[in-house]
Every structure is written in C-alpha cells, then in structure tokens.
Amino acid sequence: MKNKILIYDDIGTSGVAVLKKALQEEFSSRKIAVETVSAEDILTKNVLNASVAAFFMPGGAADNYHLKLGKSGKDLIRSYVESGGIYYGICAGAYFASQKAVFEPKNHKLRKINDYGLNLIDAVAVGTLQKELNIKPYEATANATAVVPLQDAQTNAVYTSYYHGGPWFVCKKKSPVIILAYYNLPAKKLPAVIAEKVSKGLVIASGVHYETTGSALLKCLSPDRTDYRTAQKVISELNRTEYLRRALFQKMMYYTRV
C-alpha cells in the first residue's frame, strides 16, 4: 500500500520546508504521510520501497546530490522508479535527473556541464533564463528570481510560477519525453515541465518551483536585505497570481494517484 511521500533533504537542498508544507496540505486528507529522508536513509534503510507514492528531489545544488548519493544511491532511485515509483525533480532535482545538465554556459564563473549519471529523463537541462527574464545570473538573492508565465502544452491553460535558476529542456525529435508546460516567453516557448515513463514508473521534471507561494517567501523577507525591493515585487506578483500557481501545482499533483 502506498501511504507516504518522501522528500530528499540533505546537504545542498533548499526550500524543503515549503515543499513539505504544500504536500502535507495536499495529501493529509488522504492519510498520506509526508516525510524527509537523507542520503544515508536511501543508502542504508531501504526507504524507497513499495509504500512510497512519490519521491521529491527539491531545489538546491545538484552537485551535492551527486556527491552524497553516489552511484549506489542513484541506482536505488532508478530502481524505485522502474518498479512503479514517481520521481518529481524540481529545479536542481530536474538538472539531476536529466541526461546532461548545462548551467550558465556563457558565464565563466558559474558555468557547469555535468552528466550526473541518474539519466531518468531523455533530455538536456539548460539554465538559467537570466537573459530571457532580464534577471541576474544565478545567485542566492531575489535579483536572480522571477514570476514566470507558463502555458499548458495540451490545453493552452495559463499558469504562473516562481523561478530561481531552473532549466528549460532540450529534447530529441524522437524522444519519449512528454512536454507538460512551456515557459511562455515573448519571443519563444521553451519546455518548462516535462514527463517521461521509465519502465513502470514516471519522472516529472520542472524548471520552476510550483510549490512556492508569496506568503512563504514573505516569511524570509527582512527590510535590511539588499534585495528587499526586488523581493517585494516578486512576492507581490506571486500573491496576485496565486490562483494560477495553484492550478499548476494541482496539475503536478494529479500524477500522484493515491
């Protein structure tokens, strides 16, 4: 019986509390527990078992995921998915799951090109959208964030979501990847959320933080921050379009049928 959802929480992760709260609000009425697990838990405690309805790899730093989990941890994640599990990769979790991750390729200080070896998604994850969104190259401030418009690939429904350094996806013409939503940018559309069946399981990779609300960001906002004004604008826009973010969140949760 699938009765729990797991979130990876170890060195390099960020925003886990926000994601956990969103998932608890969504699944508590269905008696589904939401728990966090470490790399050690995955490696030594058989936590990725048949009781897990979904496994979330959140935002943060994919390099740290790679180092902490190693080949054995990645093999266990892949085995979980192939046996019928669902992997949700958000931002860094999406880079981590992709065939290759290309991060800030035109910025010599930030540039990273990695094959993390998990390879759950037959696509290259490329970021960031700093030029397209007119924001700063990746940094841990609101100056590298935005509220982005998205468009449903099947229904053309409009969404918005919080963006902080996530990828878009480059897929081969005959790839098994299904595009769920695009970044709806002025000059072009780029795949923002994609899915792929892996044996009996499913992988959903997202370049945006569909779990993040304006109220969650407000709790971290202090007037003495140098990025205070930018953060205020982002929070205000998230609050104004919360119903569109919520619609995207609901679409993502639809795939966890428990």
Image: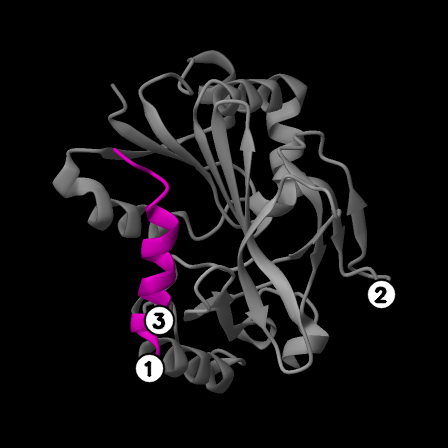
* Badge 3 density bin: few <14, some 14–19, many ≥20, Cα 10 Å: many
Camera-side residue: 63 or 30? Answer: 30
Mark 3 lies on residue: 244
Residue 133, visible in the rendered structure: yes
Decide: marks 2, 3 in contact (CB < 8 A)?
no
Whether residues under marks 2 and 1 lie with C-beta atoms below 8 angstroms apart, the answer is no
Residue at 36%, 54% (x, y): give it. 251
The span from disc 2 to disc 1 (Cα, nearest Å) is: 33 Å
Instruction: First in sequence, mark 2 or 1: give its number.
Output: 2
The amino acid on which the numbered mark 3 sits, given as a three-letter code, is Leu
Q: Residue 193's image quarter? A: bottom right
Magenta segment range?
241-258
Q: Secondary structure at mark 2?
A: loop
Q: Please name the amino acid that badge 2 sits on.
A: Lys
* Residue that appears at 48% across and 45% down: 58
Q: Is residue 255 magenta?
A: yes
Does dot 3 land on a helix, a strand or a loop? helix
Residue 212 drawn above or below residue 17: below
Q: Majority secondary structure of the magenta segment?
A: helix
Identity of the residue drawn at 54% across and 81% down: 226
Q: Is residue 214 visible?
A: no
Q: Earlier in the sequence, mark 2 or mark 3?
A: 2
Callout 1 amino acid = Arg
**Where residue 218 sits in the image (x, y, percent)?**
34, 72
Residue at the spot of label 1: 240
Position of 247 compared to 15: left or right? left
